[in-house]
Image (spheres, rainbow, N blue to C red):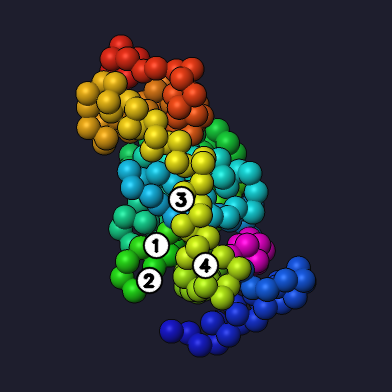
Amino acid sequence: MDINRSVRVWGLLADEARRRGGPLSVGVACHAAARVLSAEGVSVATVAPGDVYVSVFATNGLGRRLEELQSTLGEGPGLQSYVDGAPVLTSDLDTGDKRWPLFGSGAVEMGVRALFAFPLRSGTVSIGVFEVHRGGPGPMTPVELGDALVLADVISILLLSPESSGGRDFIDDAISSDHHAEVYQATGMVSVHLGVSLADALARLRGYAFVHSQSISAVAHEIVLGRLRLDESETDD
């Protein structure tokens, strides 16, 4: 570990907290990261069963839309980083990356060309993902990459620390929020109605959302309210 780098990054975070007049938190760390890493935005999410992205914090609306897009499609650099437990560094999403073709084109349409994802871990277990997005293409510099790795470690600590403004309860609250609970409720409803497994029901929700250019949470909301009922013709490929 580069001790000098770690000390410098912790100092930057402490300065950001003082500047914002509050304690060190996940949000403070994200805002500091956006400045340090020359990013348009930074976001932190955990991942619930079924590869459903659950937003913990985002410095802007675009970060939340990128999370929602990955949740809807079930693919993207953030989900890949979470599953692999390793950084996924995408310097240009406009190159037609075959790993996430739908996410790549959708992100570019939003004005995002580069996205760097880092797993948040407790030991060897992934607990979330830290994402940095930029409007222009290009890799991180070696200094930025080193800082991002330290920031990912710090955010992991903050997510799991009950003393921080964030912490494990913050993750649990995000997962159990009405917004995400509806996705699971709708998945169950589709599973019963179509007589398919929960995994297939979630896949059908994603397919419908993609075909109709909607987010999975928006589709789930309509299903839960009884205003939308999927049938075989609407969900088959």
Label 4 sits on what residue type?
Gly
Which residue is identified by label 3? 175
Residue 127 — which label? 1
For the image, the number of numbered tags is 4
Mark with earlier residue (4, 3): 4
Depth-wise, is mark 1 or mark 4 nearer the camera? 4
Label 1 sits on what residue type?
Ile
Q: Is mark 1 on a helix, strand or loop?
A: strand
Mark with earlier residue (3, 1): 1
The answer to whether residue 204 shows anywhere in this view is: no
Mark with earlier residue (4, 2): 2
Residue 100 locus on image (x, y percent): 37, 40
Depth-wise, is mark 2 or mark 3 nearer the camera? 3
Quadrant assignment for the N terminus: bottom left
What crowding class fits label 2: few (fewer than 14 Cα within 10 Å), some (14-19), or many (20 or more)?
some
Q: How far apart are marks 4 and 3 (CA)?
A: 13 Å
Residue 189 — which label? none
Which residue is identified by label 2? 122
Q: Distance between the residues labelled 2 and 3?
A: 18 Å
Q: Compared to 7, does 146 lie above or below?
A: above
Q: Is mark 3 on a helix, strand or loop?
A: helix
What crowding class fits label 1: few (fewer than 14 Cα within 10 Å), some (14-19), or many (20 or more)?
many
Q: Is mark 4 on a helix, strand or loop?
A: helix
Which residue is identified by label 4? 167
Depth-wise, is mark 4 or mark 2 nearer the camera? 4
Q: Identify the magenta region.
A: 26-37
Q: What element carries label 2?
A: strand
Point out the residue furthest to the top here.
233
